[in-house]
Amino acid sequence: MEKLFKLKARGTTVGKEIVAGVTTFLAMAYILAVNPDILSASGMAWGKVFTATALSAAIATLVMAFVANLPVALAPGLGLNAFFTYTVVFSMGCSWQLALTAVLLEGILFIVLSICGIREAIIKSIPEGLKKAVAVGIGLFITIIGLVNAGICSPDTGTIVGFVNFNMANATALVAILGLIITIVLFILKVPGAILLGIAITTIIGIPFGVTTIPAGWKPFSVPDAPYFFEFDFKGIFLNATGSFSGAVLGKFFIIFFTFLFTDLFDTIGTLMGVAEQANLKDKDGNIINAKGALLSDAVGTVAGAALGTSTVTSFVESSSGVAAGGRTGLTSVVTAVLFLLSLFLSPLFFLIPSAATAPALIFVGYLMMKSVVDIKFSDPTEGIPAFITIMTMPFAYSISKGISFGIISYVIAKCAGKKAKDIPVITWILAAIFLADIIFEAVK
């Protein structure tokens, strides 16, 4: 164990690592309920997605443990699954099979980029303010999804958007609000697994309200459903509904592919930087220890997840809770991965959880992602305005991809207007041109 994970060198013990691994799992296990809820809305089977979620999380986290030796856990990411269902399938009218194809190709490209070291170079070329803004915008996008799913936010209130009355006529919304309060209190009290515990308590509260229903003969244990296997649609990348080649179809797929790529890129790097800083897992030059292996882990996890039937796998910021509990090595990740595998036999328990119980988790994760806003330089309009446009567009346009494209375009415009064009990286110019061409194409077609 010592030889494999270098426990003494990092000032930890087997006991600390086990506690840290359990803490990380408790902090992020809500994804086992939330991810199937979101992806099943796209037409996928809840049970199959549940299995894919647990398996892909275990696979990617084990790769992180043995290749990078870092206390970082991975799973299908929030925001990326929302983009999968609400933008790619609902707004863009694509099949979930085509969305999985984009995830697969993104993962394969990430493996190549990670091995070659190109991924780190790409990260350095993207404006820092936009990286932060993307995280914040996704947080707000997730929040509004949670509010709508719980029935808290409704257009039937007489305004464009508003809150319903919290009474028994809106029992789902009432239970969700109670769940959010519970989650907030648990988090402030630093209770391990506050989000997961909040989901569990809210599910129980929902029983007398009629929000949580327990089927006759229900049992908490079962043999897991088989996941999807290689449910891809490669023809859909190029061909339209009539089976003919279409440049428009190919262009749409590129936008989907790039959005998955872009978002996953910064989710993982941001999490790794935060955890490395917290656990002091950096070399003498301030770089993340085993960064290449860590980036390879989420790439492998994404490919495995796509093959099994789930959206992009990424590093979870909740790993910081395990680091706070003393985790410093890949042994923490091994413990978390084992717990994900054990959860495979508890799918009926997670299926019991209503949207009123998972919605508080979505709303609260929005808060966690909002923290990046303090690092944006709003005092500089050439930085602050593009960041604001990115953040504002995602929830109000109900589209992560539009937020990214409008943010990059506005960044180029703002820097040029501020006579700071030299600050714009070459790749940002290229991306702005691509996104602008897409907007023009949509306008004239």
Image (cartoon, helix red, strand yellow):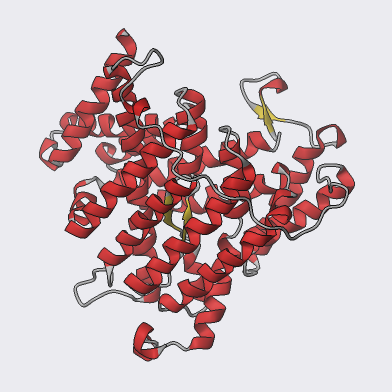
Picture coordinates of residue 196 (x, y %)? 65, 59
Q: Quadrant of residue 145?
A: top right
Question: Residue at (70%, 18%) from the top-left corner?
Answer: 158
For the N terminus, give its image quadrant. bottom left
Q: Nearer the viewer, residue 91 or 104?
A: 104
* The image quarter in which residue 254 lies: top left
Q: Is residue 265 at all visible to an observer of this figure? A: yes
1 shown above or below 119:
below
Q: Is residue 372 above or below residue 405?
A: below
Q: Is residue 142 left or right of residue 258?
A: right
Q: Answer with left or right where residue 421 lies relative to residue 120.
A: left
The spot of residue 439 in percent (x, y) is: 30, 19
Q: Residue at x 46, y 53 (%)?
A: 371
Q: Where is residue 153 drawn, in percent x and y?
A: 67, 32
Q: Residue at x 46, y 64 (%)?
A: 73
Q: Residue at x 41, y 48 (%)?
A: 373
Picture coordinates of residue 49, whole percent (x, y): 57, 46
Task: Determine whether, in the image, residue 197 is placed left or right of residue 420.
Answer: right
